[in-house]
Amino acid sequence: MDRLFERHDEYINAVPMDFIRNFMDTINWDSRLICIKGPKGVGKSTLLLQRIKSCFPEGDRHVLYCSADTGYFATHTLADTADQFVKTGGTALFIDEIHKYEGWSHELKEIHDLHKDLHVVVSGSSLIEMNNGKADLSRRMVEYEMPGLSFREYIGLETGNKFDTISLENLLENASAFCNGIKQKCRPLEYFRQYLISGYYPFFFEDRPTYGLRLENIVNYTIDTELTSQRNIETGNTRKIKALLQVISGMLPFETDIAKISRNIGIQRLTTLKYLKSLEEARIIRRLFSDLSTTSDLQKPDKIFMDNTNLLHALSQSRPETGTVRETFFCSQLAGAGHSIEYGGLKSGDFRIDKKYIIEVGGRDKGFSQVKNEENGYVAADDIDSAVFRKIPLWAFGFLY
């Protein structure tokens, strides 16, 4: 255990505390078994370390942070480590990169059932592997999915200002006052374009010049390693999956033609649908349907977007289509705030949110024709900084989380 505590101290001493994400406050830390999952690079490890540093005194041996992908666990089991930790008075165990440990879900179940006074927090970057293992812990583990930085968080880091979140309902009802309040602190449009390209993953602030390369590496690792091992995709087909992503990143914001996409990359339609489901599970793409209540796993999506605009820019062979960038941003921010998003159809606005609001996304000159008959119809317009009637700046939806 001494070896683990030495590394624990090194990690705790190095973690920065100048910026703590609001996601910290969404977690019920009193739960006995917590899982924080999310794509690589969104800041899960930092969050765990910040939680420890803010809640436990320096040198406190009642808490332990460790990573399941270290050499220590080549010769020690999670169960034995937890057992020894509890015997020496441990009460809070934080295990990072839990998906790197084979059989992690079975041992967590054993730890949870055996040590009633031990609180365990785990994190994992392989969303596919985490989904595979959660069935064993369905009645024991509380799950949270951590998104990347919102535009609000990004602009706060860039300007040094603190911005509060706003609920969707409050934004739609009080958009003008909200936007005016933000503009008193900064000019949102000054930072918006850069966020769309490189503001979603926090590691942008660690090493800006290599951001795009690191993003491509994350996607390649997900496809080459995780999809092949967890979804039994043949290695020879990974190139077709990458070709599929390039097709998606170059699509116009219209309805999806799965048959055409399949022909373009040379795979069968059913295989394309399976790949799309796995890519969404890995948070590389986002599938949209017109009615989530009747959606099946292999149903044809009505729209497909990259998960966020940074991935869109990184994977597109040319400059992404402006309409696609706008709609990708909108969906990313709404999903990050926990809202359900459905495709609105060609006649009633782009998106239906929480089965209540109809929102059309477009440029500064976008009119209300597609939402004029909707009681809760709004326009999210790019390239404006003030709200007028029911036309709200697109960037304002980046303050929902």
Image (spheres, helix red, strand yellow):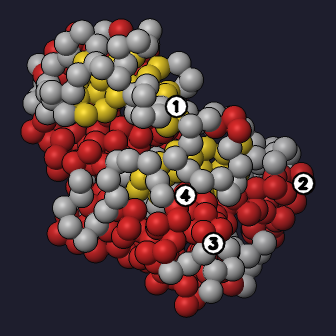
Q: Amino acid at mark 2?
A: Leu
* Residue annotated with mark 4: 280
Q: Nearer the viewer, residue 331 or 296?
A: 296
Q: Determine the CA span between mark 3 and mark 4.
A: 14 Å
Residue shown at 64% from the left, 37% from the top? 292
- Which residue is painted at 75% across and 67% down in the image? 104
Report the Cα–Cα distance between label 2 and label 1: 37 Å
**Mark 4 falls on what kind of element?**
helix
- Counting residues from the N terminus, which is met first, the one under dot 1 or under dot 4? 4
Q: Earlier in the sequence, mark 3 or mark 1?
A: 3
In this rendering, would 134 be left or right of 249? right
Q: Earlier in the sequence, mark 3 or mark 4?
A: 3
Residue 339: numbered disc: 1
- Which quadrant holds the N terminus? bottom right
**Camera-nearest label, 3 or 1:** 3
- Secondary structure under badge 3? helix
